Structure formats: C-alpha cells, structure tokens
Amino acid sequence: MKKNLTARTVVIVVTILLSVFLIIDIPKSGADVVKNLQNNIRLGLDLKGGTHLVMQVQVQDAVKADAEQTADRLKEDLKKQNIAWNSMDVNEVSRVEDADKVSLSIKGVPATQSSAFRSLVAERYPSYVLTAQNSTDYTAQLKASELLDLKSDTVKRAVDTIGNRIDQLGLAEKSVQPYGGGSTYQILIQLPGVDDPARAKELIGTAAVLEICDVKDGPYSSRDAALAQHGGVLPLGTRLVRAKPRGTSEGEQWYLVSKSPVISGREMRNARPGQDDMRKWETSFNLSPDGGKRFGKYTEANIGNKLAVVLDGQAVSVATIQSKIEDSGRITGLGSEEESVDLSRYLRSGSLPARVTPNEERSIGPSLGNDSIHEGIVAGVAGLVAVVVVMLVYYKRSGVNAVLALVLNTIILLAAVSWFHAVLTLPGIAGIILTIGMAVDSNVLIFERIREELRSGKSVVAAVDTGFNKAWWTIVDTHVTTVVSCAFLFLFGEGPVRGFAVTLVIGLIANVFTAVFVSRTIFDYELSGSRQLQELSI
Amino acid sequence: MQLFKNTNYDFLGKKWPFIIASLVLTAAGFASIIVRGGIKYGIDFKGGALMTVKFADTPPLEKIRSVIPGASVQNFTDPQTKNEVEIGIELQEERELNLSRQKMETALATTFGQPNSGKLDFNNASQQALIERLRDPLARNGVASSEPQLQKLAADLLNFRNTPPRSGLITDFGQLSSVPGVNAGILNTLKQECYLSPYTVIKTEMVGPKVGAELRNKAVLATLYALAGMLAYIAFRFEWIYGLGAVIAVFHDTLITIGLFSIFNEAIDMTVIAALLTLVGYSMNDTIVIFDRIRENLKITRREPLEAVMNKAVNQTLSRTIMTSGLTFLTIIALFLFGGPVLHPFSFALVCGVIVGTYSSVFIASPIVLFWHNYTDKRKRPRAALLASAQARPETAARKSPSRAVK
C-alpha cells in the first residue's frame, strides 16, 4: 500500500511540474513568466482583436476561363484542319452553383465535316464531352470528374495566392484555409491583431484576376474617344480597359485590348523587381512551360506591338514587345522603384484563378479584446473563489482535497491548451469556468457517498474505498455524455464554439484524473499516517 | 455541516404541479415566439451587418437612426457597456456586405467625426495609419525618430488607448502624456495632426444571409445528433425507456430555455447554441446520477414498488444534487454578472438551463420511466402474479420480473 502511494505521488508531482512547464516554460524572472505565458497560450481573435473573413471562391470564373481558352485553341485547330464553323461562344454564369452549366457552343460546322470535327475534339480535348445539338451545332462541357478537379484546384490555388499576399502584411499568426466542406468552395482567413481590416481586404480580394492581353489600340483619353474611333461599336473579341492611374498624372488612359488573354495568372510563376544596365526600373517574370510556349509564339508574331498587364480589369502596365519572349521576360520602362516592386508583387502573388467575394466578416477591435479578457478573468476568479469557500465550509478538511484537485485540473487544462497549440477564445474561458463547475460535481459525488457510507457505520478506510468505487461508474457515465455533446459541438460549430468544446473536453478528461486519482491519493495519504483513523474530516 | 441527511420527501408523489408548471412555461415560450414573429436570431444565423460602436458620452440614438436609414439601433443596458450602441442592418444578399460596412462607417464619420478637417481620427486609427501620419510632422517638429522608434511609439500609444478604462476612446490628448516616451513635442504634433472623435468602432460583424442559414441548420442538426447519441448511450447502459425519459427531459429543458430567450427578447447566436449543448450535457449528468442510484437500489430491494425506489434514490442523491447545482449555479452567476456583454446570452442560457435542468431530472425524466413501467406492469400483472406465486424462491421472482430487469 505504501509503495503504491509513493508511485502515485510521483506521478502527480511529475504531472504538476510538466503542466507548469508547458504553461510558462522555465522563466528567468517575473516579467519572463508573463511573456512565456503569452507565447504559450494563444488567444483567439475575440480576445486579441483581429479580423476573421470567410470568402467565397467564385469557381465558375475558373471554369469559364478554361472554356474560353479551349475555345481559342479550338479555333486555331479547326483552321489548321480546314474545318469551317460559324460561331463559338461560352455562356455567362454568375453563380457558384451554376459552375456546372458552363458550356462552349460551336455552331455551323458543316454536316460533311462532322466526323472530322468529332475526332479532332476527342483527340485534342479529351477532358471535354461533345454533344451534338443538331447536324451542325454542338456543345462541349468539361467531364464531370475534370470539373470537380478544376473546382477544388481553384480553391487550393486561391488559398495559396491569398496566403502569399497576406505574408506580405508581415503577420505572425495568420491562417488561410479551405472552409466549410468540399462543395461550398469557401476560404477562411484569420488575421489576428490586424486593426485595419479594410487594408487587409484590399490586399486580399480586390486584385483578383491577372491577365496579359494583346493591345489592339490606344491610348485614348476617355472611353468615349475610344468608341468614337471605332464607329461607336467595339470590334469583335475586344474590350476597353482603363489604365491604373499613377501618382498625380491627370486624365485617364484607355486601351483597347483583346477579350481573352494571351497569358492568365495561372501561368505566372515568379516575378522580381530589378534594374537594367541604365539603372532604369524593370520587373522580370517567369512563366510555366506551357505558358512560355504560347507566349513565345505570340511575342514572335507581335514584335513592335504592345501588350498590357491587366489586373482586375485595369491595365497596370503597358509595354512594347521588344523580342520573342518565351518563359522568362522583362517588363521595362517602369517609372520608379515603387512601381517595379508593386508590379512584381502583383505578378508574384500570382493571380487569383477566380474572384473571391466576402461571405462573412468579423472584426474585433483590440479594445474589445482587452475588455473581454479582463471580464473573463474576473468572472473566472470570482467563480473559483466562491466554489473554494463553499467547499471548505461544507466539507471541512476534505474540502482541501477538492480544492487541490480543482486547481490541478485548471493547470492541466491550461497546459493542454498550450501543448495542442489550441486557441483560447472567450467561450473557451467560459468552458474553463464550466469545467470548474463540473469538476466540483465529481468531487461532491464522491464526498457525499463517503458521508453516506460513514453514516451507515462503515469504518473510515472502508467508507473511502466504497465511496470512490461506487461513484466511479457514475462519473464515467456523466463525463461520457458531456463528451458526446462536445463532440457534436466540435463537428458542427466553428471558431470560438470549437474552442469551447475543446477546452471542455480536455477539462473533463483532466477532471477524471484529478477527481479520482489525485483526490484518492490525497485521502490515502491522510489515512496511511495513523493506522486507526476513527474520524474523517468531511 | 451536513444538510439533507436521511431525508424522505415524496418527490415523485408531488410530480404533477411541476409537470403542469413545465407545460405552462413551454406554452408561454411558444406563445412569446409566435407573438414576436419567430425566434430572434443573432447575426450568426440571420445574416446581416452589425457594428458595435462605443461613445464617449450617452449615444444619440435618434441621430444615428436618422443618418443610417433602415438600421436597428440598440443601446446596451449593462452598466459596463452603458455607452455602447449596436447598429444593425439586414442584408438580403452576400453582395451587400462590403457596401453596408462602408455605408455605416461613412455615416458615422460624417455625423460625428471631422472628415473635412484633414486630420486623422485618433480614436479609429490603425497602427500603420498613425505611423504614416506622424512620420513627417514629427521630423519637422524636431522630434527625431528612427523607424523602430516610430513603431514602438505608435504601438505604445494605441496600447494605452485600447486598455481599460479607456477601452478604445481617448477624450483628451492630455491623457496620453502618461505613455512612456511621450514628451511635449510629440503631444503637440499629435494635436496638430489628429483629432479625437467621440466614438470608436469596437466590433463589426457581417454575415451573408446564405451563410447564416447554413449555420442555423448545422446548429439544429448538431443538437439533434447530440441528443440521439446520448439516447443511444443511456439506452445501452440502462434500459431504452430510461434513455427516452432522459432525452425527453433534456428536450424539454432546451425548449423552455429557447422560450425564455424569446420572452426576455434575447438573441440566439452560435455561442447560445454552445450554451444549450452544455446545458444538455449538464442536465443529462443530473439525470444519470439519479438513474444510477435507482439502478443500484433496484438490485437490492425486492418487492418495493418502483415509485418508492425512485423516491429513495432521489432522496439519497439530494444533497449531492443541491451541492452541485448550487456550486455550478454560483460559477455561472459569476459569469453572468462579470462576464461582460459578449458572454451575456451564453450565461443567460446557462442560468435558465441549470435551474430547469435540475428539476427536470427529478420531475420529468423519472416520472416518464415511472409512467411507462406502471402502464406495462398493469398489462402484465395477472401473469406476473401467477409466476410469483408459483415460484418457491423470492429472489428468483424478483429477478424474473421483466419490468425491473436492468443490466
């Protein structure tokens, strides 16, 4: 019995030390304690202040872009094979749910060439399924599996791109991740400590789609001037983009560019600011091999013409093609270092393969966070003090057992929060406070049972023994049911609610340890002292 | 000291007043929900834009309402958050999210701030904005500062502003003189470049309506699944009717709490769902402790009727129940009184829940089991009596009586 006691005491002491270590490391001074505490216990957005964003990835944009690129390539292929056609269109879709409805319609293929057409499509575009509408018209849609891949790939790339952009904000603990399950195509962005959510959102979401387009005509001083030059109607396959205003230059500049880009952001791999031999600023960039091939063909055929780097419908840079560019090139003629840096940043953070729009946004100012922490701690301490007082008064010296178990419970809980790098939210603090309440329950169960056994005349040792044994299964039952409800809370809740579920579950597990094992050891310690303990202070 | 030793109250005999009280409360809850036109959802479930703004003085509610048309403007009655206002706009579509926020910010700035003065609003400035604003003027006024020094100064200033009791609002630049590193030169620069608006935005929340509806469904599903899970566990550990009784009791607790929310016009958001699920767990706790005792007693007693056994079990666990409920209630009251406005709905749910949850274990869960066993016993009684008289050994009779067999 005595050996067992020593072993158990060792286990308890080791647990205490380990827990304290996890919370405050090995502090070298008083201030160190606070610092380590802050490092180890990560606070959630609602306690620290910050921004929480849920963005919807408009995956239909990516599907449409793919269809449009396919249309362009198909046109070239058909020309090569001398297959005629009247028109090729991709339909407009505006909602995420309609992404599956994107289709490329090809009209006017002569019936005589239909088999040649079909075999061409089957050979060169295996990811598309061709359906004949009648003898001359067809629609092509992405195969279902390819469509699914494209959509989830789009979300992944959006996550990466946004992650890159946020990196540039220099935040320590940000997180960007897919959210809400596969078919919702949402992204969760959490920016703790960010006190200017407008700026963060600007960086993340507004610069959406990057394209390099062929410049047909320009610059014009206004939209109307451009239209006037072309008889009031834009030529087929072109659009007007406005140049991004630079500094204090007055007036606008409009360019006529091709509707579908030569290169889209998907092919952009890297970009750096730099200076050329004459100390003029330029931005050099790299493309993917596929993009490089296409860009090479285009630039070779268009030396002397202009191309425009279009970002979210604005031309951020217009450059003249000096020579054939394959997969690495330079954009020269930039006005300043800032321009070069900005441009490379845009190019490098890739471009979002599809627009992202906000579905949910929460910003907590840092002052509210401070207030909440303050209030949470006050409530926690008040609750704890009340419980301790009542326990001591009602159960006398055994109350001390319970209080020790409670304190240990809280310490283990905080240590677990630190170890799992879990984030402590305000509901999490509420969870801790609730754990205190439930931990009390276990202790009360055991003590009341011991009292009952004592009343029925059992000896002290036997009463303690029976008390713990009888109460054990009840404790198991009650804890399992609460853990079950926490599991569902974790599965279905989000953010702060999950924090609550996690702290409560950890607290319950710690509680089984402290209320049964630790409390029992303390009792046994008391009882092992004098052989014939007649009375138990309980 | 020991309260409640060896009590012998006839709890189950007095079940009817409590059952009726429960029914009345539930009905009142439903009535309130109908009268108020549905459950009042928080922004999590309803979608919309909500901005919490703290004012230096009593907030002019009417003025705010007039500059932001269509918004619901609410003042908090909590003494700690007396001057805080919640401005809410309903959103019909996800697209309006950005617009609404800009609308509200601009309206506040034009009405209460000084947007045309060319100065920076100190009370609503971000760290970066403050640095950018102060960099040149500080140099001009002869206060030399390197970039790291500027960063630290801005951080210290804002930290001072954000900690209680200022909590985000500075009313006079003089208050800043106690910030480390602030001298007269810096104060002057601040007064030149910044002004102090009488309000600060402490929180904005915007949830698209589609997202809100999704969250709501998930929350309801979570609660239902949790209940099913618990029913299975209890049916496994006791008898199926015990599981059903426990679940009905818990369901009743949830319904009454939601009803009370409606009566007191509190909003239900995600943290309230967390509270409800906690309450479910807690009420289950209570019920299981009593069931456990009933099971234990049934193993020992032979011919006592179920009602008597149940009463005995409740009396035996009475002191534990009072203590635990009392102590849990104490901790929750601490949360309710000191936990602040963010936790307010959460702690309110738990306060109601603990009270209702405790009495439901005794007066709802156990009677259900009792009713069922009485009903099935009535139908089996002729046969059981025959069996009992035919058996020589009383233990076998007790063991064979099917309505009492518990694992």
Image (cartoon, helix red, strand yellow):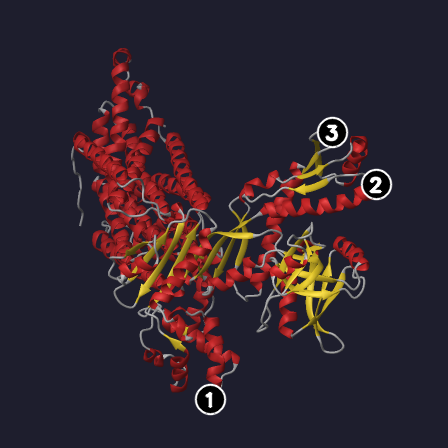
Out of A478 and B352, give the one closest to the viewer.
B352
Q: Which chain does tag 2 point to? A: A
Which element carries disc 1, helix, strand or loop?
loop
Q: Which chain does tag 1 point to? A: B
Residue at 27% x, 37% y: name it: B34
Residue receiving disc 3: A135
Figure check: A72 above or below A283:
above
Which element carries disc 3, helix, strand or loop?
loop
Q: Which of the two discs, 1 and 2, sits closer to the camera?
A: 2
Q: Is residue B376 left or right of residue A148?
A: left
**Residue B24, horizontal then vertical, whole percent:** 20, 34
The CA distance from mark 1 to mark 3 is 83 Å
Out of A51 and A487, give the one closest to the viewer.
A51
Figure check: A250 above or below B87:
below
Q: Which chain does tag 3 point to? A: A
Which disc is residue B174 wearing?
none
Which element carries disc 2, helix, strand or loop?
loop
Q: Pointers 1 and 3 in contact (CB under 8 A)?
A: no
**Residue B225, horizontal then vertical, whole percent:** 42, 36
Residue receiving disc 2: A81
How crowded is the residue under tag 2: few (<14 C-alpha within 10 Å), some, or many (20+)?
Answer: few
Same chain, labels 2 and 3? yes
- Can residue B277 be seen? yes
Figure check: A428 above or below A471:
below
Q: Amino acid at mark 3?
A: Ser
Residue at 29% x, 40% y: name it: B37
Mark positioned earlier in the residue sequence (2 or 3): 2
Residue receiving disc 1: B142
Out of B232 and A146, give the one closest to the viewer.
A146
